[in-house]
Image: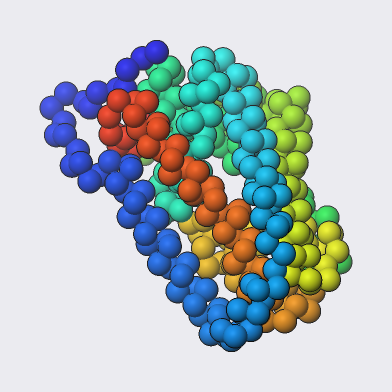
Amino acid sequence: MSPPAPPPPGASAPAPNDDLVHRFVRWVVGAAVFGALLYLGGSLWAGFDDMKAAFGAFQWWLVPPLVALTLTNYGLRFLKWHYFLGRLKVPMPFVEDLWNYLAGLAMVISPGKAGELLKPYVVRARTGVPMATTIPALVSERLTDAIAMLALAGISVTTYAADQAGYVLAPLVLVGLGLAVLAHKGLSLAILRLLGRLPVLGKVVPKLEEMVRATRVCLAPVPFLVSLLLSFGAWFAECVAYWLVLRGLDVAATLDVSVFIYAASTVLGAPAPGGLGVSDGALAFFARTLIGAPENLAVASALITRVVTLWVGVGVGAIALVRVSRMLGGDIHLDQAQDAG
């Protein structure tokens, strides 16, 4: 295994508090405070006594199966990530890559998705494979997640939100067009050559060409189908978890409307770190408007669901992040990886 890449000659050593672990602590504190204020507002809206009654009525024996469904999501998505690395012939050991993937769960709350490069960074540090080779695995992973969630939301969008169908169908059409361009080797490389004539992009086109070739490997027909099935199964598991939360609160909801609400809420919250504020609000709003759940049960269902599907992952990721930091034998400074070398 290759040791962690040293800083460039002449570069000053990063400040200790710029280490990713220290930055994560700041992120999680900020996210936790924001989440607490969010649900305090929800409790004020629904009424503290009514919220207490909602939590008191919840069937807490459902927590283990809820966590099991969330871990199923993580497990299937890890298999997809590791499968992509295998397609790219990256010799990342399975156990080390599992720690790496779990650490990436902590990065979901990073501002502006700043921590998304953690997995390629760790792979480079452990194998020496350039990040330009493995970033396409990250892009392919996130893309197939997005397609699966849009598909899950699209299954029932005409039933529960026909007037909003364009918000689901339009991204699917755009993704389809992008995949069609990517599938045509000559067309995709011709576009890159045109971009190479631009003064700003000319220097990075060689790396972009390398990344496009790697992406084509990840999203060839067979691996694309395999990864999409894994994504579909992973996110359907969390949709089922949301349905169980509603059942645990004695809210009458069918599985299909639960799938739509969870998938649509997740898609809406995708631009925000961890979906904080957006996914939470969407879950409560849709439960109230589509299912007719009382305010206290709508808010309680959102809170329980987000604790299980978001904060369990952040907790697991925090443990794994410390393990990965020790595995690399030092601090993690993603700002040194921006050249994707």
Residue appearing at x 18%, y 42% in the figure: 15
Up-down relation of residue 219 to residue 268 (above or below):
above
x, y percentage for residue 35?
Answer: 47, 67
Up-down relation of residue 332 to residue 131 (above or below):
below
Residue appearing at x 59%, y 67% in the figure: 303
Residue appearing at x 54%, y 47% in the figure: 313
- Nearer-the-camera pick, 74 or 214: 74
Q: Is residue 270 rendered to the left or right of residue 246?
A: left
Q: Is residue 341 visible?
A: no
The colour scheme of the drawn protein is: rainbow
- Nearer-the-camera pick, 258 or 129: 258
x, y percentage for residue 302?
Answer: 63, 67
x, y percentage for residue 20?
Answer: 33, 42
x, y percentage for residue 82?
Answer: 59, 26
Q: How many marks?
A: 0
Report the quarter where the C terminus lies. Answer: top left
Q: Is residue 274 visible?
A: yes
Up-down relation of residue 187 to residue 232 (above or below):
above
Residue appearing at x 29%, y 46% in the figure: 22
Report the quarter where the N terminus lies. Answer: top left
Q: Is residue 323 rendered to the left or right of residue 41?
A: left
Up-down relation of residue 35 to residue 339 (above or below):
below
